[in-house]
């Protein structure tokens, strides 16, 4: 039975991933996410059902539009696959319950934010509002620790922003990152929020320091911080409690 549900949840994730691709393309352009139907951005040929199946259509079409032969970006199957796998993982960790539903919605939102941030270095406010709603639902269910989490993350990242400006005279943390940190804290609560914050700095360090060392990027260069925050939040959603337990056990031997 679990296998059937897992398959269903994964298929749902693949379909949501396909929808996220549409959002990633349209939201920054200020377009509607429901109209018009999915079409090739180059020749505007409307996609039939068979050309719109997550991952599979990309493979069958060999990454090209059937009409004009224009290349379809690897982003499409990649996002679909990632969303499907994360939905499956969430079901495996959490089981079938309301928390799973809220979590997969939150994961979808984080994927959307990551890609938009990588592409245009901006975190859309509409995505932040959606995150606030999810966080408030969890707060209604589980209590005030979620509000404390949101406030803690906002202050922490505001502190980093102010310090960055004072020390380096440049924007160390954008306003979008601040809001993103806020909704992550609101969703996770303050304890897991701390884990996510620490993990995001850790991920940023192991990613950015080698690039700096190799001279691939400079200190002055703007690197979007959003993807580090979102990856950290997803890891924390799955393993945050285990990380916390491990951490406490270091002091309670
Ligand atoms: Zn086309």
Image (spheres, rainbow, N blue to C red):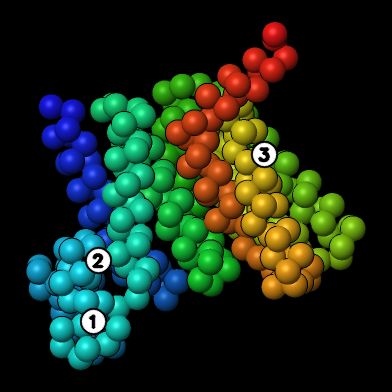
Mark 1 highlights which residue? 64
Residue 161 coordinates in the image, percent (x, y): 77, 54
On the picture, is 93 further left or further right than 173?
left
Residue 118 coordinates in the image, percent (x, y): 53, 66
Mark 3 highlights which residue? 198
Identify the secondary structure beneath mark 2. loop
Which image quadrant for residue 190? top right
**Residue 213: mark:** none
Identify the secondary structure beneath mark 3. helix
The reply to whether residue 113 is visible in this rendering is: yes
Which sits earlier in the primary sequence, circle 3 or circle 1?
1
The reply to whether residue 99 is visible in this rendering is: no
Q: Nearer the viewer, residue 170 or 223?
A: 223
Q: CA separation, marks 1 and 2?
A: 23 Å
Q: CA separation, marks 3 and 1?
A: 41 Å
Q: Which residue does the image show at 72% across and 14% down from the upper left?
A: 251
Callout 3 touching callout 1 (CB < 8 Å): no
Please rate how many residues cluster around mark 3, counting C-alpha atoms within 10 Å: few if below 14, some from 14 to 19, many from 20.
Answer: few
On the picture, is 168 further left or further right than 153?
right
Mark 2 highlights which residue? 34
Quarter of the image containing the C terminus? top right
Residue 250 coordinates in the image, percent (x, y): 69, 17
Residue 2 coordinates in the image, percent (x, y): 18, 28
Query: Disc 2 or disc 3, which is closer to the eye?
Result: 3
Please rate how many residues cluster around mark 1, counting C-alpha atoms within 10 Å: few if below 14, some from 14 to 19, many from 20.
Answer: some
Callout 2 touching callout 3 (CB < 8 Å): no
Q: Which residue does the image show at 44% across and 26% down from the upper left?
A: 140
Which sits earlier in the primary sequence, circle 2 or circle 3?
2
Q: CA separation, marks 2 and 3?
A: 37 Å
The yes-or-no answer for disc 2 within 8 Å of ligand 1 is: no
């Amino acid at each position: 039975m679990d296998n059937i549900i897992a398959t269903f949840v994964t298929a749902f994730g693949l379909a949501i991933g396909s929808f996220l691709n549409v959002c990633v393309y349209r939201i920054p352009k200020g377009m509607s996410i429901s109209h018009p139907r999915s079409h090739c951005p180059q020749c505007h040929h409307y996609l039939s059902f068979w050309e719109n199946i997550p991952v599979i259509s990309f493979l069958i079409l060999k990454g090209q539009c059937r009409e004009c032969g224009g290349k379809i970006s690897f982003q499409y199957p990649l996002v679909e696959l990632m969303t499907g796998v994360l939905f499956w993982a969430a079901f495996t960790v959490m089981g079938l319950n309301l928390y799973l539903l809220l979590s997969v919605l939150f994961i979808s939102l984080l994927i959307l934010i990551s890609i938009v941030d990588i592409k245009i270095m901006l975190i859309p406010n509409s995505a932040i509002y959606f995150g606030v709603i999810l966080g408030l639902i969890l707060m209604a269910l589980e209590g005030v620790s979620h509000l404390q989490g949101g406030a803690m993350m906002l202050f922490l990242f505001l502190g980093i922003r102010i310090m960055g400006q004072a020390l380096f005279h440049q924007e160390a943390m954008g306003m979008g990152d601040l809001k993103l940190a806020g909704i992550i804290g609101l969703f996770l609560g303050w304890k897991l929020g701390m884990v996510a914050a620490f993990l995001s700095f850790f991920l940023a360090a192991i990613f950015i320091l080698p690039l700096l060392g190799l001279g691939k990027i400079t200190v002055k260069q703007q690197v979007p911080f959003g993807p580090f925050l979102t990856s950290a939040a997803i890891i924390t959603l799955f393993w945050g409690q285990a990380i916390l337990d491990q951490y406490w056990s270091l002091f309670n031997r």
